[in-house]
Amino acid sequence: MISITYKEDRTSDMNDVYIEEDKSILDAIQRLDKSGKKILFVHRDRKLLASLTDGDIRRWILKKGDLQMPVKCVANYQPKFLYEQEENLAMRMIREQEIDAVPIVDKEHLIKKIIFANDSMQEHSVFDKEIPVVIMAGGLGTRLSPYTNILPKPLIPVGDYPIAEYIINLFYEYGCSQFYMIVNYKRNMIKAYFDELDKKYLLDFITEEKQLGTGGGISLLKGKIKDTFILTNCDILIDDDLTKAYRQHIESGNIITMVCSLKNFTIPYGVVNIGEDGAISSMQEKPNMSFFTNTGCYFVEPEVIEDLEYNEPIDFPAVIEKYMKAEKRVGIYPIGEEAWFDMGQIDELEKMKVKLGY
């Protein structure tokens, strides 16, 4: 079984899981990414005040909350904790209450240590039902040329395994056992590789006879999928608990839920804003910008397949736009910047190799 492992230690500095209540929510997101944890502890001079989870931040984002607001706007000021003499109960509390960590405090509520769910525990849950996975692997992969002059993009190696095998095995760990791979370019090479594997899952190849884009290929699945399914590009990995994304998709009643990564970018110049009369209204020195990026991973309802014109080219973002215009509910599931691994370009491929320890 293939799992994501990291060359660098993302959890070594416990200062990364502490945050002051006047820091911004964007600061908290960046700290969560840096630490590799799913929870921060709000403190004042190491005195425990509150906890702040990735789920708290996600709910704030979905309510269109301002990321520049202080963390005290979203933190939980009734955090779970144990006193020093109760430390032996920590792992039991983590298991029974399904939490990520327990702070150990003294009688003054000063944090003495934090006990996290240990590495032997499962990083994520499994889906509570069988969810088919559709992998879009029919493209030419021109951004990865010259690699793709020889190999199709799904077979580009990232260390010891092709990227498509990483994707399949990661979803297999979630309990997925039915996979569909939409193929076109160098499809016989892709089929030959997977046919030779000793697989514990079912993999059906869906063959395009012409380039159908990222949406048109799934029209070839009409009549094959009857329930919610996962649609993913063949060049990305998501290091987040997607069972939570699935639950949000179902509870929100979305027809499509797009997994989106929050990206942060500092403009390296001073920015000038002007009013209608040409006068300067404000100035910002090297401001930070935050925006959500489509990762290429979606939870999709089966009616989307049935609504598509059979064997007609269309990209999946265009499919989404059609539903938005028809006022069908399309939502996002936000993840951190470091939780998205993209190898769509050569420089990103090299970054992915480093993150995966190669």
Image (cartoon, grey):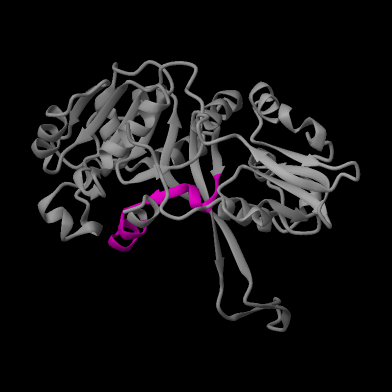
Membership of 341 in magenta stretch: yes
| Any part of residue 50 in sight | yes
User: How many numbered badges does the structure rendering display?
Assistant: 0
* 176 relative position to 198: left or right: right
Above or below for 29 versus 238: below
Q: Position of residue 127 (x, y in %)?
A: 47, 22
Say which residue appears at 35% left-offset and 27% top-offset. 133
27 sits to left or right of 23: left
Q: Nearer the viewer, residue 37 or 314?
A: 37
Q: Is residue 114 magenta?
A: no
Of 241 and 145, nearer the camera is 241
Magenta range: 335-351
* Quarter of the N terminus within the rendering: top left
Q: Quadrant of residue 75?
A: top right
Residue 231 image-quadrant placement: top left
Residue at x 27%, y 21% (from the top left corner): 201
User: Residue 168's spot in the image, x, y percent?
Assistant: 31, 32
